[in-house]
Amino acid sequence: MPASGSNSAVAVWTILRKECRSEWRTRYGLNAALLFALASLTAVSFAAGRLGDRSDVLAALLWIVLLFATLSSLSHAFVREVEGRTMLLLRLVASPTEIATGKLLFNVLFLAVVEVFAVPLFLVFTGAPPVRWGPFLAVLGLGTIALAASSTLIGAVIAQTRGRGALFAGVSLPVLLPVLAAAVSGTRQMWSAHPVAPSLRLLAAYAVALLAASLLLYDHLWED
Amino acid sequence: MSAAARVVVSGVSHRFGPRRGLEAVSFDVAAPGVLAVTGANGSGKSTLLRILAGLLRPTTGSTTLELAGKEVPRAARRRHVGLASPELAFYEELTARENLAFAATARGMANVHSAVNEALGRTGLAARAADLVAEFSSGMKQRLRLAFAVLHRPRILLLDEPGSHLDAGGREVVERLVQDACADGLVVLATNDPTESALARERIELSGRGLDHPA
């Protein structure tokens, strides 16, 4: 009896709601992410002053802040389930693909919420030049999806391994580097009035490839 | 429950890397009935139940789960099987009701509210439904595992050490759940408790060596 599309959509939506409720009750990741963003931007602002004429530094700084503010939460989406021994509960109520899709959507939402607070802070603290909102939001949106897709995939793969913390660092570097490079490049081009289309294409292609690989892989995870 | 549930296990064994988790075992049971699986600690009782639930792929052999004469694919077993296991934990930041409602909704059940109320009532947890699981004792968590297992009225109930941490009232709950479920369904009990074993009409003992006995 294969799950129907509507059943799968209900399962994904239910897992997303559960993730939001758990995060709201525990503030496991949100407080840490916002604190990191605020602390790092304040420190940079005090140390380097306003960086309005350095679009290359600004682009790198924006994505470093977003990556490190959210990475520990994103990578722990599955680790928390394994360490809290709730993975069995999840596996008994939803398929691996439904679980991973729910987690992915939560990670996208989590990143978006952090960005809502962190990006305005970044623009104010660093004295960044005016942004071209269309290209900027396109780079931010695609970068967010690619970042969430890669960290969800890595988190799912390493969740049940021993030494998962150390493994995450090793596995995530080659997977996250293309996302980071394309997002930084696109943001820099946005500020220097160059076309951002090449970076957007790269981010979109990478996100699609990660999502496709994820869909192929998830149903074979956690079997033994 | 349907009377047509059947489980066929043929030469199933499992290894966790170099360690043998379950020696080869075969049996064929059909509803209505209760099968007790006994064996030493480490002989593979829990592993067998996880294989039956479709959570683990056996290293050798095969398992077939049939409902109304049709084989249920492994990936769909979780819809028809209820599992209560010591390894099952709940979200401590959610209440008992929220945990069960999450499970029922994710499974796509209709009438989530009444199903949750019924499961809580059957396991004696109705009065503590609004409490966070973090505040539960071991016995209450075990009752919640039982509520989770019967929540979707599964045709096959897999109970792994169902009486662990339970008081006399809790053990009566287990007895009632088993009697209700086996009226026209199938219950597989993994236990070494003689009282729980006595609920079963059929028994198998796993032949694994289990743990070494101290001299």
Image (cartoon, coloured by chain):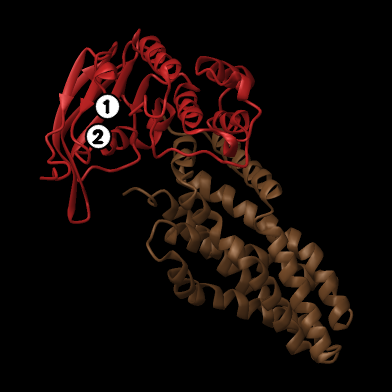
Q: Nearer the observer, disc 1 or disc 2?
A: 1
Q: CA distance from mark 1 to mark 2?
A: 8 Å
Count numbered badges in the picture: 2
Three-letter residue code for mark 2: Lys
Q: Quadrant of residue A143?
A: bottom right
Q: Is residue A128 left or right of residue B87?
A: right
Q: Does residue A131 appear in the picture of this structure?
A: no
| Nearest to N terminus: mark 1 or mark 2 | 2
Relative to B44, say whether A117 is above or below: below
Q: Residue at x 56, y 41 (%)?
A: B91
Q: Which residue is mark 2?
A: B45
Residue B19 place in picture, x, y as percent: 18, 52
Which chain is in red here? B
Q: Is residue A167 left or right of residue A147?
A: left
Could you say whether the residue bearing mark 2 is in a helix, strand or loop?
A: helix
Relative to A164, say whether B127 is above or below: above
Q: Residue at x 74, y 68 (%)?
A: A35
